[in-house]
Amino acid sequence: MKNTAFTQKHLAAGAKMAPFAGFNMPISYTGINDEHAAVRNNAGVFDVSHMGEFILKGEGALDLIQRITTNDASKLSAGKAQYSALTNNEGGIVDDLLVYCLEPNKSYMLVVNAGNIQKDWNWISALNTAGVEMHNISEKTCLLAVQGPNATKILQPLTEMDILNLKYYTFTKGKFAGVDNVLISATGYTGAGGVEIYFEDINGAADIIWDAIFEAGKTAGIKPIGLGARDTLRLEMGFCLYGNDIDDTTSPLEAGLGWITRFTKNFTASSILEKQKSEGVKRKLVGFEMIDKGIPRHDYQIADAEGNIIGKVTSGTQAPSLQKAIGMGYVTTENTHTDNEIYILIRDKKLKAKVVKLPFQ
């Protein structure tokens, strides 16, 4: 099991640790509800250094990205990022990822999910027929996500980069807390605002940046946050989690990711997805909230009023900010309209729920 550069910091802060995607990661410190509230109302720091980062360089870099991802990376200028997906030959999702444009047409950073680093690397390498220069910098890249409405206010004194006014899905690069070559982006996974901080752990940079953030945020009450609250925060926003809500068997159109699926270019299985778009899909990912008392969990079955199985739950929790049980799951297309009553099978009980629009409210 791998450690990140911040493992000792987590242990010193009393974190409950557990294996996640091959890494020893903090799940919680003071409790998921408390940490969730800290991010929604103030600011919190997530260690997400387990994520993967690839650099693609050279004249063919953009062409390769265009052929393997669903979104249109030709729209990106320097300092901009986009959410996208890698699709397999059947139209399923190899991974969802972020594409950062470092230099138009020549240099890009792909940020992939921790559990998919090797799978994604192998997949992209196999499709790299034009000899694009590829570098897997995952092992040496540290990543902290500082999230919450007060996050940028707390961090701004640590840098001359203007992070207070950093627009969503843009990034900047410069000196942060005295450390050079730090990339700061605004592509958050919590819906609470904030930034992500990428850097290489050279000359103790990890300790320097961690300590500087907590010193700057001491009077404001900034807190370290574990992966437990990261999950409840993203679920309240209706954001997909790879391995739960999307995987190799789900298509972007089934998952509600048509907005990142651009048919203005050819990409892996684009013809299959175009056919899905024209003919319609048989199932779709929906958000739902419980009417009866009960908490939906991954893989629980979903039924209609007559007891027919119409799908299954992919994610579910008791939402701390909303004070109600919510979930996402795939159901047959005819059962996807808002306010449609569905039933979650929990311990042989058929508990009523209703389909709602995302994000949850």
Image: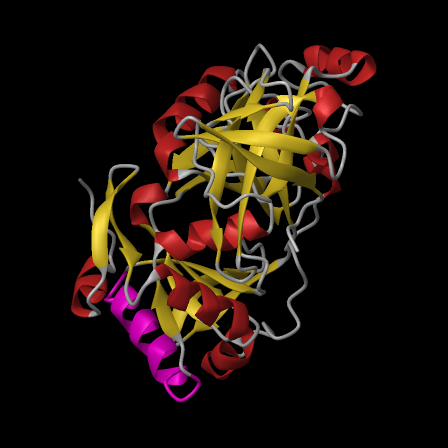
The location of residue 194, given as percent across then percent down, is: 55, 66
Specify the quadrant of the image occupied by residue 142. Answer: bottom left
* Residue found at x 45% / y 20%: 123
Q: Does 134 appear above or below 178?
A: above
Residue 336 visible from this viewpoint: yes
Relative to 274, residue 227 above or below: below
Q: Is residue 359 left or right of residue 290?
A: right
Residue 209, given in percent of the width and then of the height, sits at 34, 71
Residue nearer the viewer, 105 or 315: 315
Give the magenta part as a residue range: 202-220
Q: Nearer the viewer, residue 353 or 78?
A: 353
Q: Position of residue 126 (x, y in %)?
A: 46, 16
Query: Image quadrant for the C terminus?
Result: bottom right
* 309 horizontally vs 345: left or right: right
Q: How is the image coloured?
A: secondary structure
205 within the magenta span = yes
Left or right, residue 14 beside residue 101: left
Looking at the rendered image, the quarter that the N terminus falls into is top left
Tell me if residue 31 comes above or below residue 60 in the rendering: below
Compared to residue 94, the image places residue 151 above or below, namely below
In depth, the one of 61 and 275 nearer the eye is: 275
Residue 105 visible somewhere in the drawing: no
Q: Residue at x 37, y 60 (%)?
A: 32
Q: In terms of image quadrants, where is residue 272?
A: top right
Across and down, in percent, residue 179 comes to: 37, 71
Q: Residue at position x 54%, y 41% from top?
A: 327
Q: Nearer the viewer, residue 137 or 185?
A: 185
Q: Is residue 342 magenta?
A: no
Outermost residue on the bottom side: it is 219
Q: Main secondary structure of the magenta part?
A: helix
Residue depicted at 37% across the width and 38% down the height = 114
